[in-house]
Image (tube, rainbow, N blue to C red):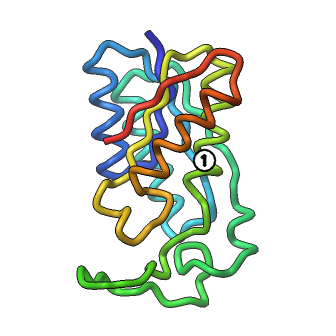
Amino acid sequence: MKAACLIFGGMDSSTLAYYAKNEGYWIYALHANYGQRTESKERACAKKIASLLDARNFTEIDLRYFEKFGTSSLTDKTIPVDTFNPDRAHVPNTYVPFRNANILSIATSYAEAKCTDTIFIGVQSLDYSGYPDCRPDFIDAFRRVIALGTKDPIPYEVD
């Protein structure tokens, strides 16, 4: 079995990649550079995780066009990063507009090209209160998009 694993170097994606390996999948690592402030550190960690998992390859995609949008403190260094507030009732300024949909679209193309059995993305389930593209409804809807838009529907897993 083969799995396309989105690995960003953080706890969520790393844990899920290890889970996929433990379930018997060969890992095809995919990392996205979307212009985030911590990209070099994330890339180094993602490469290390992919190496430790004996990934079949490590593919990096360039999505730095998010830097041009200027609406997220993660990609625009002129915007100060919000401090975490568990009682927030708004989308935090660290939200990158529709990022997960962009990444999942590319991951779907990658998975189809590599003939993987599934896609693993480690979106943090607690983030969905602030990040619209981490909500369970969004993930379920994207599953339907994959089923409708690929020649052989590819399931994917989330933590």
Identify the secondary structure beneath mark 1.
helix
Q: Position of residue 158 (x, y in %)?
A: 37, 39
At horizontal 61% and vertical 90% (from top left) the residue drawn is: 78
At horizontal 47% and vertical 15% (from top left) the residue drawn is: 2
Q: Position of residue 73 (x, y in %)?
A: 54, 80
Of the pair 123 and 136, the residue shown nearer to us: 136
Q: Is residue 141 above or below residue 52?
A: below
At horizontal 35% and vertical 33% (from top left) the residue drawn is: 17
Q: Position of residue 113 (x, y in %)?
A: 69, 20
Position of 71 with respect to 122 (left or right) is right
Q: Quadrant of the N terminus?
A: top left
Q: Amino acid at mark 1?
A: Ile
Q: Is residue 85 above or below residue 22?
A: below
Of the pair 20 and 105, the residue shown nearer to us: 105
Res. 85 image quadrant: bottom left
Residue bearing the label numbered 1: 103
Q: Is residue 14 above or below residue 98?
A: above
Q: Is residue 23 above or below residue 120?
A: above
At horizontal 31% and vertical 42% (from top left) the residue drawn is: 159
